[in-house]
Amino acid sequence: MQQASTAVPAGPGAVTTVRQPELLLADYHFDVPLDHKAPEGELIRLYAREVVAAGKTAAQRERLPWLLYLQGGPGSGADRPVGRSGWLDRALDDYRVLLLDQRGTGRSTPANRQTLPLRGGPEEQAEYLSHFRADAIVRDCELIRRRLIGDRPWTVLGQSFGGFCAVTYLSHAPEGLDSVLLAGGLPAIDSGIDTDAVYRTAYPRMERKTLAHYARYPDDEATVRALVRHLTDHEEVLTDGTLLTVPALQQLGFLLGTGYGSHQLHYLLEDAFVPTADGPRLSDTFRERMAAVLSRAANPLFTLLLESIYAQDGRATDWAAERVRAEFPAFDAGKALVEDRPVLLTGETAHPWMLDTHAALRPLRRTAELLAERTGWGPLYDTGRLARNTVPVAAVIYHDDLYVDTEHSLATARSIRGLRTWVTDEFEHDGIRAGGRRVLDRLLWLVRDGRG
């Protein structure tokens, strides 16, 4: 078992600086408590990358305010920039940007099938991962802020799950925030909306997105039906060792939540089959690309912790997406074939069968089960404090977002005092990337206009 480090939390440590075209990058490392309620206990390491526009003098850089970027997920490291582009290009006009690898991701102390056994058995692993939710991430951010800039507040830009974290930030440490920018990241905060309710709204959205895709690419409906028939009769293993089952195939609907996702799905499906001496089989091209889409090797926390990001009522999540799916029989692929209906695709969900089919998750099966059984998840949001909020907040809400329910987001927007919204159907959930500079510019305008 890994020995706990109990040193005093460290500052940014030695800073390594490198140059890219138009950028100056600096690497930071911070030691923070695993459990912020026990600050003298074990420490874990966080990594963050500062990005500033090249050509600025040291004095000019020091005068710039900071913008902290929180990545979507859970379980994903921050963006890795190559030159000025997208939202980062706009941010660098006004800010020093800090790209944080949230705990367990990227170059921060990793949490995956290779490292988690160092904690001990599944019970110890699940207990360890219980400290990886938004409340812990916010406390990490506050320690980093104070070590970098003292008492000065900073701006936070939260994409998707990063936006959920930013709303938790507003609830627990608004004194650290100059302003908050949310991109597709307004969570449901009403105590009456539990994890089950989140997924009851998700499946109808997934049905709409699937049927819209088939309307755009009619041949894909037949290809998916052929794949379901093939996988019913043949065992197919992807190039990373993942077993491709019918439910795993249906998770390709995850792609339909981004601006180019429908096109990506079409190009993936058009290479599905190849003729062989044993009849049509899945092509190596398809198997390789499917492995890249479905793999959880790089972000196992997405499956292990996905449902916990909605849990704040003390109850176990108990594989909510799997249970709620039974309420939507239209997603039964076998019945769809028999009844000559389109096979519906699913999306951003975690299921217990993934612990058998996905190669990177098999060693973590019991750990995932324990997290699904866990009770006592504490509140992530303080609705009273949010109703009294004084921090300028702007949010872009995508009107038919696959991953975050629009009505839940609008209800939350009404619950946070002073929050200004931009509701649009111009972009999908990845609008901060697809719209880049323009989306961030609109959010910044809303914040500045709101200050009066």
Image (cartoon, grey):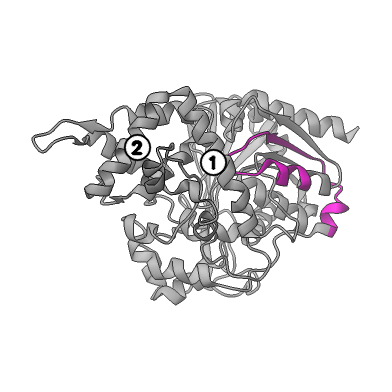
Give the numbered dot on residue 249. Answer: none
Residue 8 in picture, x, y percent from top left: 59, 69
Residue 314 position (above or below residue 95): below
Identified at 52% across, 43% down, the residue is 78
Residue 108 in picture, x, y percent from top left: 48, 54
Q: Nearer the viewer, residue 438 or 430?
A: 430
Task: Decide if residue 179 is in sight here.
Answer: no
Number of residues whose C-alpha sits closer than 10 Å to that of mark 2, classed few (under 14), some (14–19) or many (20 or more): some
Q: Nearer the viewer, residue 159 or 308?
A: 308
Number of residues whose C-alpha sits closer than 10 Å to that of mark 1, classed few (under 14), some (14–19) or many (20 or more): many
Residue 241 in picture, x, y percent from top left: 25, 51
Magenta stretch in the rendered image: 384-411
Residue 362 in picture, x, y percent from top left: 33, 62
Magenta segment: does it hold 355?
Answer: no
Identified at 72% across, 43% down, the residue is 407
C-alpha distance separating marks 2 and 1:
17 Å
The residue identified by callout 2 is 225
Q: Nearer the viewer, residue 199 or 92?
A: 199
Residue 340 position (above or below residue 311): above
Give the numbered dot on residue 206. Answer: 1
